[in-house]
Amino acid sequence: MNYANLEILGITAPIGIKKYHDDGFVESLKGHIIKLNRLYDCECYNYIRVNELSMGKCASIYLNCHIFYIKQSIETENILVRAHEETHALDIFNQLDALAERLLEEQRIKINFKEIDESEVIASIGSLYALHARGIPQSEIELLCKMYGDGDSSTTAKKIYEQSKLSRKRSF
């Protein structure tokens, strides 16, 4: 079995495909997409999202998952974007339970990802996890979500995250 190391999420997960590639920061999304299309000898433009290429209809793409992104101006922005794309990869690998376990163990957030239909909401929750895990102040997280959030998905993710917090047990 092959594994993917999702660095920003801090998760290593089994994958049901041949290989996971974190191509890192790229100069041009379009240029990198063209490079991948040449590598796999196919056109996958219909399967391109804003910051990453996940999987397309070409048989060779089904065997591989690439994520890549544009370098942002500050490190917390890079964390948000990279965690978002790593969460999409985790979703592709059907391994969101690993993120759910981390959320519960580390942040007392109980989320059942099977109840969330929108992949953008799921990926935004992954970003929130990564930012909170690094102790980023709530005010900065709010600002980042406004800057990079895609409207309803970001708002929904924040709402689910906040509503899923478990209360702290009091010990006497």
Image (cartoon, helix red, strand yellow):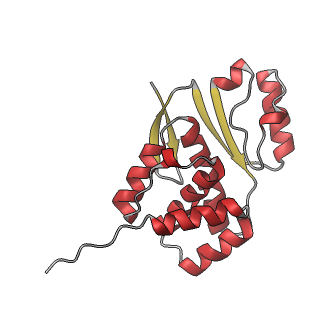
The answer to which of 26 and 95 lies nearer the viewer is 95
- Would you place residue 97 above or below residue 78 in this image? above
Residue shown at the point (44%, 64%) measured from the top left:
164
Residue at far top of view: 59
**Front one among 70 and 158:** 158
Left or right: residue 7 versus residue 70 is left
- Of the 4 image quadrants, the one containing the N terminus is top left
Q: Is residue 82 left or right of residue 44?
A: left
Residue at the spot 81% in from the left edge and 21% down from the top edge = 41
Q: Position of residue 99 (x, y in %)?
A: 45, 50
Residue visible at 50% across and 48% down? 115
Quarter that holds the C terminus: bottom left
Q: Residue at x 81, y 28 (%)?
A: 37
Residue 167 occupies quadrant? bottom left
The total number of labels drawn is 0
Point out residue 9 in the picture as x, y percentages from the top left corner.
Answer: 50, 53
| 123 to the left or right of 57 | left
| Image coordinates for residue 137, horizontal then vertical, percent | 53, 78
Residue 88 x %, y %: 61, 45
Image quadrant assignment for residue 52: top right
